[in-house]
Amino acid sequence: MTAKIFGPVNTPYEAKISSSDPIFYQPEYPFLPPKMKFVNRVYHPNISSQTGAICLDILKDKWTPVLTLKSALISLQSLLSTPEPDDPQDAQVAAHYKRDKQDFEQTAKYWTEVYANPNAEVLPDGVKPEAVARLIDMGFGRSNAI
């Protein structure tokens, strides 16, 4: 199963759809949390900018059997609104957030435009549009081609 969530209003992720990798229920579910990570790259202190791994307490040691996939996705959306840089998944992004929140938000918004929107015209510096087009023609998704 995959999930898609909209970025929360008044955040750098606003109105863009973020996708998670297939959500895997462990055999011990609901006694253990589902396994989740982002497919597209997200610039956030609690999400790995390289792998999409998510640092969210209810997906780890705070999970209880009364929680559901819906509550996990709502918590994930809340995490996008309220980063926790003191418990980071990505230390460099967390340091950026603490050092210059305004610049962090600009970078996060740029990444959201580039990676969360499959039809975005914006490309990261140094990426050639024709190379991306070739990879897409070969069957790679846009976010994988960038």
Image: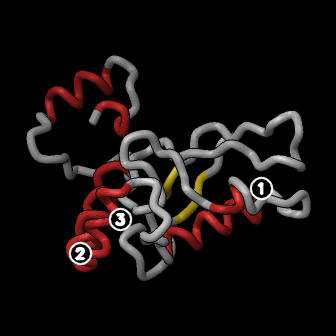
Q: Residues within 10 Å of mark 2 (few under 14, many from 20)?
A: few
Q: Nearer the viewer, residue 78 or 137?
A: 78
The quarter of the image holding the C terminus is top left
Q: Residues within 10 Å of mark 1 (few under 14, many from 20)?
A: some
Q: Nearer the viewer, residue 141 or 92?
A: 92
What percent of the width, then of the height, locates residue 110? Answer: 25, 61
Q: Secondary structure at mark 2?
A: helix
Q: How far from the left and from the top, in percent, is residue 94? A: 35, 65
Q: Are marks 2 and 1 in contact (CB under 8 Å)?
A: no
Task: Identify the colour scheme used.
Answer: secondary structure
Give the residue displayed 11% in from the left and 34% down from the top. 128
Figure quadrant of residue 45 = bottom left
For marks 2 and 3, the one nearer the N-term is 3
Give me the residue at 64% from left, 49% from top: 3
- Which label number is shown at residue 69? 1
Q: Which residue is mark 2?
A: 99
| Mark 2 or 1, closer to the camera | 2
Which residue type does callout 1 highlight? Answer: Leu
Q: Report the number of numbered marks.
A: 3
Residue marked by disc 3:
94
